[in-house]
Image (spheres, rainbow, N blue to C red):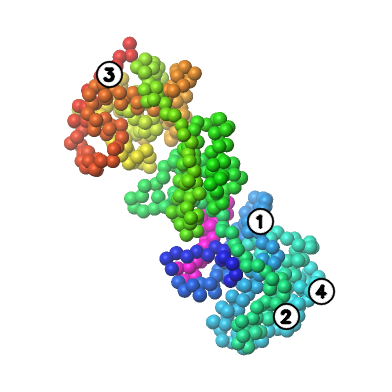
Amino acid sequence: MAGKLRHWKERNGRYSVRIVIPKHLRPYFDGRTELEIQLGGDKREANRRYSAADASLMRQIGIARAKHEAATGQTAKQLPYPLTAQQIALRDYQNQIAFDAELRAHDPRYAQSGIDADEARRYRDGFAGKLSDDELEELVGARLERARLAGNTNAVKRTSEWRALAQALCVASYEAMAREDERNEGDFAGKPTHPLLADAAPIEDAPDPITFDNIIDDEVARRARGKNAKPLPARTVKKYRDHCAAFAKWRKSKNALTVTAAEGKGWIEFLQDAGELSNRTVKAMLQNVRTVMNWGRQSDPADFFPAGNPLNGIKAPDFTTTPSYLRAFTMDEAKLVLAAARKEEKAMFRWIPWLCAYSGMRVSEAGSLRKEDFFEVGDRWFWKVTTAGNRSLKTAGSERRIPVHEALSHEGLIDFIKDAKAGRLFKGETKDEVSVQPRISTWVRGLIPFDKRPELSPNHGWRHLFEDFCRRDGVPEDARNYMTGRTDGGSQELYGRSEVMLPGLAAAMDRIEAFSLT
């Protein structure tokens, strides 16, 4: 086989032909993402079986593509695997030679029958230009259709392109029959003599396109696999998809295999020059695309940028960080927001600000709370911040139980919990699961306009303020870190944290002095 073998895969001494199924064709394969035929562990045998296996998979893809086009009325704007007539003929010749070897290995009667001279003469007349289009179609039409299904050509009968391809396939068959005749006499050293094949350069296949979505799909599947799996949160998956889509749109290609460092640098500069995003956001976008590229390398280090991720060497943008105290609510702002929350009828706006003010919770964590998360130990109420029920947290260390502050009890939180229906406490108008961060942020900005306090973090500001409450009122550092879901990576975080600690945790929460809204 000349050149690099298309779709050839080697893993742990085993060989196979593998094709990634285009996303729009996966419904025709029961949702599978790839097709694969195992070729065994003997490389010589695998090479011999390669051509037939590759042709079989490409035919399956082609049939699915034809079904998709028939169902949608849409044809591909460009060929997925375009080849010249010479390349198609060379591949066809190689496939015929491989098939000849396959037959000789399994049936001793095959080599005892000579070639059909009349058939050989028809192929010779075909590439000599003596046959009509109808005669050529009868002779090589099936192989022309295979090339079309494989996405190698879209040549149409009665065109010069179609006729040239048909004549090239006649060359391939004539030369293959000549090799067959030589092999029947024990000569296996024969080479093509027709210039179309004799002068053909080895076909160096470009690797199959691997899109950013392909990589993300594989990583999502990998993380969800196994008994104690830790799946990627849907929100995180969307973030990676969105940032990769933005990069792909800018570079005009979804093929992650063709990414260059120059493109990464150019994209960063484009985003910065546009002036719509902060440098911090631009840096995060670059990091997320870089992470997806790293996943691709981890999945297939031999073929996916074996020399290294091209985005790793790019310097991310620098940015200044707003001081923490400017992002936090002031006491007056906190009182303003909490007083406004008292007047709200919608549970999301009524309780999330209060819960965050007296716990340092992330707004996203508060938004996913359920009635079942609240529980009593003795005469004290607590709630769990948990990943149970397919919920996600920023870090594994964010799992925790938080005492209900006395101020929340006085506000009527426990009565609200008792009266609530089972399930999510804070729902949307038309569906249960909603993203509360943008809703809470917009609501807060209606009270504290951006132009008056641009530095304020409407959602994260509660977290900063609660940290200051803890410092002001002498809450022990380990209790503060636990209640806010922070971690320092110390081994002590792996031990204990049973119900035995809850009374002490409640005592630490009680140190925080409630503030009056009057």
Would you say residue 391 sits in the magenta stretch?
A: no
Residue to which mark 4 is pinned: 130
Extent of the magenta region: 14-40
**How far across and down, in percent of the image, does residue 290 sit?**
48, 45
**How far across and down, in percent of the image, does residue 242 sit?**
52, 40
Q: Is residue 186 visible?
A: yes
Q: Amino acid at mark 4?
A: Lys
**Does label 2 or label 4 sit earlier along the sequence?**
2
**How far across and down, in percent of the image, does residue 278 sit?**
50, 31
State the mark number for residue 120.
Answer: 2
Residue to which mark 3 is pinned: 514
Q: CA distance from mark 2 to mark 4?
A: 14 Å
Q: Residues within 10 Å of mark 3 (few under 14, many from 20)?
A: few
**How far across and down, in percent of the image, does residue 271 sit?**
55, 35
Residue to which mark 1 is pinned: 79
Q: CA distance from mark 3 to mark 1?
A: 68 Å
Q: Which residue is rendered at x = 46% and y = 29% of the image?
A: 438
Would you say residue 31 sits in the magenta stretch?
A: yes
**Does label 1 or label 2 sit earlier along the sequence?**
1
Is residue 102 rendered to the left or right of residue 418? Answer: right
Is residue 308 rendered to the left or right of residue 341? Answer: right
Mark 4 residue element: loop
Q: Which residue is rendered at x = 58% and y = 79% of the image?
A: 101
**Does label 2 or label 3 sit earlier along the sequence?**
2
Q: CA distance from mark 3 to mark 4?
A: 98 Å
Question: Do the CB atoms of the residues marked 2 and 3 lie less than 8 Å apart?
Answer: no
Q: Quadrant of the N terminus?
A: bottom right
Q: Quadrant of the C terminus?
A: top left
